[in-house]
Image (cartoon, helix red, strand yellow):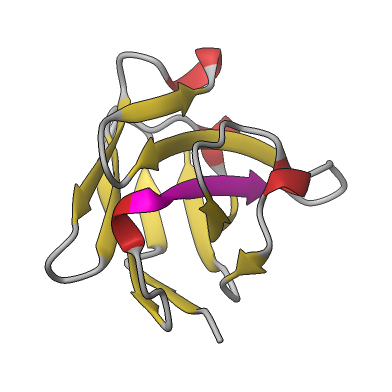
Amino acid sequence: QVQLLESGGGSVQAGGSLRLSCSASGITEIETSTMGWFRQAAGKEREGVAAIYMGGSTTFRADSVKGRFSVLRDNFKKQVYLQMNNLAPEATAVYYCAHCSGICGGIAYEYRSWGQGTQVTVSS
């Protein structure tokens, strides 16, 4: 059973940075998986932020975060990171880590396993 645990959320002022981490367990062949980051703001639908194929590179990054957010991987530790720079108040949301078998992008229904989420709050 795949289990995902996010950490690193918190409160930051606009222009600041945060790094979210996602620790994965129960994945037998992580190199053939995609790990995605999604977020859901209050009253809005969940949206894809970024995703990375664990056997390669980034497969998706939302236009709204290009140039500011990066997704990184550490296959040995089975961890994925979302580096968020120059944060804006619009980034306030619960951020979720998700697992997909194969190569996936920013579509939530492609992902079968999800973490519990971590809150990110950006104040102006």
Q: Position of residue 40 (x, y in %)?
A: 70, 49
Horizontally, residue 104 falls left or right of residue 76, namely right
Horizontally, residue 32 falls left or right of residue 97, namely left
> Start and end of the magenta stretch?
32-40
Q: Confirm whether residue 32 shows in the render.
A: yes
Figure check: 38 above or below 51? below
Q: Tally the numbered discs.
A: 0
Q: Residue furthest right?
A: 43
Image quadrant holding the N terminus, namely bottom right
Q: Position of residue 30 (x, y in %)?
A: 33, 61
Residue 33 sits inside the magenta stretch? yes
Q: Position of residue 9 (x, y in %)?
A: 40, 64
Q: Confirm whether residue 20 shows in the render.
A: no
Figure check: 84 above or below 66? below
Figure check: 87 above or below 32? above
Residue at 57% of width from left, 68% of height from top? 117
Of 64 and 11, the residue lying toward us: 64
Q: Position of residue 2 (x, y in %)?
A: 52, 79
Q: Residue furthest left?
A: 76
Q: Quadrant of residue 78?
A: bottom left
Residue at 38% of width from left, 33% of height from top? 87
Horizontally, residue 106 falls left or right of residue 123, namely right
Of 103 and 82, the residue lying toward us: 103
Residue 96 sits inside the magenta stretch? no
Figure check: 70 above or below 32? above
Assign the magenta stretch its main secondary structure: strand
Of 39 and 110, the residue lying toward us: 110
Residue at 34% of width from left, 28% of height from top? 58
